[in-house]
Image (cartoon, rainbow, N blue to C red):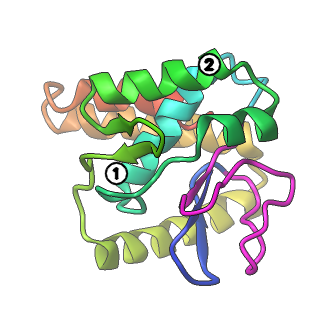
Amino acid sequence: MVIDKGDSTQADTSGASPASAGGGTPGGGPRGPGSPIEFRLDATSGVPTYLQLVQQVEHALRLGYLKPGDQLPKVRDVVAWLAINPNTVLKAYKELEIKGLAAGRPGQGTFVQATLSQVALPELAGLQKSLLGWLTAADAAGLDQDGIVALFTSALRDFHERRGGAGDRRGAASAETEGVA
């Protein structure tokens, strides 16, 4: 998923290449007019397509890249770019509505209604910089993407267990699957 924050700097939470500074969609996911999110699919992840879309929106909300009022790509744009069934996109958007995160407006599209952001953007920028340094070190140590995911998942699980085990266990479990979208 690529998030357009309104300038030439774009954050990519899926590991895919960010779009060019001109707002294009190389390799392309859909980003319709007025939509700051571009979906990407991983056919090898084993995660259903509609859940990949839901997870990418949730990631963008958690990171503060999407906020209430932002428009999600129109169903027809997602279908055209990803070559998927419209019912798949509708199912994802319906799931977001059920969770209270988005709402459809007839004739206009689907819009974000709530946020999951827990940390302000300046703190996230510092954390991302630290994480990029860690990823660089992991790469230099010879870990491939699967090795990095395995190490991170293991460390996250250990972290939650040390915090008392009763912490956000759902968050630790979902980290194993969310990273694939």
| Stretch of the chain drawn in magenta | 15-41
Assess disc 1: are there few (<14), some (14-19) or many (≥20) residues with their C-alpha within 10 Å of its C-alpha. Answer: some
| Residue nearer the viewer, 99 or 159 | 99
Residue that mark 2 sits on? 88
Residue that mark 1 sits on? 62
| Residue nearer the viewer, 94 or 43 | 94
Where residue 15 sits: x, y (%)? Answer: 68, 52
Q: Which of the two discs, 1 and 2, labels the residue nearer the N terminus?
A: 1
Give the amino acid at mark 2: Thr
Quadrant hosting residue 159: top left
Specify whether residue 48 is in view. no
Where residue 125 sits: x, y (%)? Answer: 41, 75
Give the amino acid at mark 1: Arg
Q: Residue at x 56, y 38 (%)?
A: 179
Residue 17 shown in magenta: yes
Q: Residue at x 33, y 59 (%)?
A: 67
Q: Relative to residue 112, is residue 134 depicted above or below?
A: below
The secondary structure making up most of the magenta span is: loop
Q: Residue at x 82, y 29 (%)?
A: 83
